[in-house]
Amino acid sequence: MPEFESARFADKSDYENFQQLFVSSRHEADTYKAADIWFALEALEGPPSQIFSDYLESEDKSILIGEYNNVPVGFMLVHLFRINDDIAARVDEVFVHEDMREVGVGEHLMDAAINWAKGNKAKHILGRTFPGDRHMKNFYERFKITARLIEVSKKLD
């Protein structure tokens, strides 16, 4: 059987796979520098079931499922918003199982997100990554998504 990767929009039957991947993504996120800030300010709140339903049922949000040989191995959560008069899309969360990160699943997810954004007349796509997450930074840069805003902090004694 030939090996192949793909991305598609989620449907209700994807919840169990999404939940497993979502929990894995949160465990991994917890290992990164600034995870505490991300969890406090940026991370989507609520249980996976609530997040899944919210993105699945909204017209301004989308869940993409990344697959390898028809097996779900990743997801991307994207939403539309306004920047002045333009529509923009933001990658709220993206995760691909560690063993599948070099086979192209992430690229298919991003291509699908970009196509969805363009189909919704978005003029920009944004994403975030943790400091030191060189893999994710390189992933975004392959799509010419570069830093526009850098958040800085200092621990106060």
Image: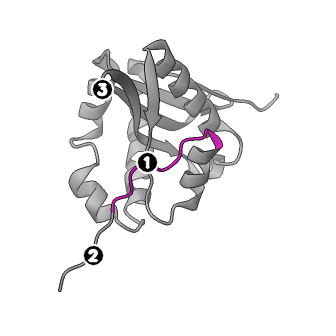
In reply to whether residue 118 is colored magenta, the answer given is no
Looking at the image, is mark 2 or mark 3 earlier in the sequence?
3
Horizontal and vertical percent for residue 34? 34, 65
**If the image is split into quadrants, where does the C terminus sit?**
bottom left
In the depicted structure, whether residue 154 falls above or below residue 84: below
| Residue type of the residue flagged with mark 2 | Lys
Please name the residue shown 19% across and 81% down the image.
156
- What segment is highlighted magenta in the picture? 142-151
Indicate the quadrant where residue 37 lies.
bottom left
In the depicted structure, whether residue 102 falls above or below residue 49: below
Along the viewing direction, whichever of 104 and 99 lies nearer the viewer: 104
Look at mark 3 in the image and give the residue it sits on.
82
Looking at the image, is mark 1 or mark 2 earlier in the sequence?
1
Look at mark 1 in the image and give the residue it sits on.
148
Judged from this view, the residue extending furthest toward the left is 157
Horizontal and vertical percent for residue 28? 44, 58
| Residue type of the residue flagged with mark 3 | Arg
- Asked if residue 150 lies left or right of residue 141, the reply is left
Look at mark 2 in the image and give the residue it sits on.
154
